[in-house]
Amino acid sequence: MCSNSIGKRFVLTIFGESHGKCVGVVVDGCPPGLPLKEEDIQKELDKRKPSKQFYSTTRVEEDKVNILSGVFNGYTTGAPICMLVWNRGGESEVYEEFKWKPRPGHADYPAYVKYGGYHDYRGGGIFSSRITVGFVAAGAIAKKLLKQVGVEVLAHVVEIGGVKIEKKPTIQEIKEKVYSNPLRCVDLEAAKKMEEKILKAKEEGDSVGGVVEAIALNVPPGVGEPIFGSLDAEIAKFLFCIPAVKGVEFGVGFKAARMKGSENNDEYVVKDGRITTLTNNSGGILGGMSTGMPITVRVAFKPPSSIPKKQRTVDLKRMENTTLEVKGRYDVCFVPRAVPIVEAVVANVLIDYILPLGIVKLGRAKN
C-alpha cells in the first residue's frame, strides 16, 4: 500500500529522508500556463527555515529549491512538477545510539517493528519534519493558483507553552505583522510571555508545544464532497500528516460541546447582496462543504520530543531497560516554524477541491 501521495486532482508525492541526499515533492495536476519560477517556491521555503533565536535548531539548511520538470520558459507545462532540495547540514553520528535505543516521543520503535530495522533512523528518516519541505514547496504553487480566484490562506501562532493571545487580531494585522515577528504571533505582549516560557523550558532541558490558527478567505460556498470527501475531513487528514500534530479543530471546535444549539448555530442574513452568517462558529464548513465564510482551523503541536533530559527507554538488542540523553541540534519550540507549513497544507487541500470546479482560468500562450 502506497501512502506517500495525497490529493485527487492536485496530487503530491513526497520523497526523501531527513539525513538522506535530498527531500522533495512531485506535484501532478497543476494546469499549464501558471507563471512559476524557483524564486516563487524559495520565498515560501525561506519562511520555514529555523530562525536565529535561541529556541530554534542550529541545523540551518540552505533549502535551495531546484525545479526539475513541469516548468518551461517561466510557465507550468501541465506535466508533473518535480521540486528537489538537497540536504547539506545533517550530523548523522549522534543517531547511531538510537538504532537500538528508541527515543521517547519519536516514531523510532514502531518504525523499527514495521520495517524490521531497515528504516533510516538518522534524524527520524521519513518521520522527520524535514519532509514538510515538500508540503511547503507544493503549497507555494497551490497559493499561486488560489490567488487566481481570490482565495488567500493565512496562519499565525495563537498559543505557546500555555500562553494564549488575549486579543483576536484582524485579518489585516495578520497579513502585516505575522512574518515580522520571530514567534509569528501578532499579539506582541503574548509573544513576550511565550518567549519567557520557551526560555524557561530550555533552561530546564525541556521543550514546549503550542497552537497555530489558519484562516482561508474568500472560499466560495459549496466546496467539498460529502460524505467521505468532506472538506474539513480532508484538511484535518493532511494536517495530521505534519509531524508533531496532535489535534485539529474547526471554528469553536471542542467548545461547541459546551454550548447550546441557540449559541452554536450560525444564523443567516443577507448583507450587501450576498448571504452571510452573523457568527462563524462552524469555522466556515457545514456538512463537509464550505459555507462562504472564512474557514478557520486550529492545529495543536506537541512539544518537540528531542530533549537533553535523561529519559528511560529500552535496548532493543539486549531487550533490557536503559536510559538515554538526546544530544544534537533541536528545536525547543517548533510552533513558529509550523506557521508556513500549516498555510501550505490548507492551500494544497483547497486547490485540490477548487481545480475541478473549472473556475481557475489561466491564459493561452501568445505567439
Image (cartoon, helix red, strand yellow):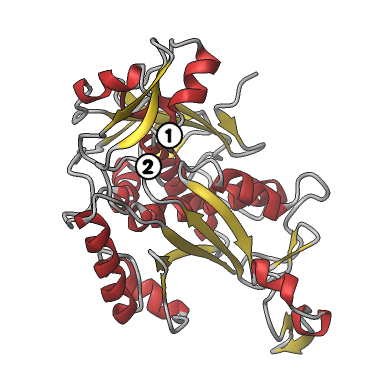
Q: Earlier in the sequence, mark 2 or mark 1?
A: 1
Q: Quadrant of residue 330?
A: top left
Q: CA distance from mark 2 to mark 1?
A: 6 Å
- Amino acid at the residue labelled 2: Ser
Task: Work out whether residue 181 can be spotted.
Answer: no
Looking at the image, how many numbered discs can be counted on the residues? 2
- Viewed as shown, does residue 264 lie left or right of 139? right
Local packing at callout 2 (Cα closer than 10 Å; few below 14, some 14-19, many 20+) is some
Residue 316: x %, y % from top left: 42, 15
Which residue is the site of mark 2?
305
- Viewed as shown, does residue 272 lie left or right of 134? right
Q: Vertical placement of 50 versus 64: above or below?
A: below
Task: Work out whether residue 262 can be spotted.
Answer: yes
Local packing at callout 1 (Cα closer than 10 Å; few below 14, some 14-19, many 20+) is some
- Amino acid at the residue labelled 1: His
As rendered, which of 317 and 80 lies closer to the eye? 317
Q: Residue at x 79, y 84 (%)?
A: 267
Residue 318: x %, y % from top left: 39, 10
Q: Vertical placement of 86 versus 75: above or below?
A: above
Q: Quadrant of residue 72?
A: top left
Q: Secondary structure at mark 2?
A: loop
Circle number at residue 106: 1
Circle number at residue 19: none
Q: Residue at x 49, y 65 (%)?
A: 213
Q: Vertical placement of 193 versus 90: above or below?
A: below
Q: Secondary structure at mark 1?
A: loop
Q: Quadrant of residue 309?
A: top left
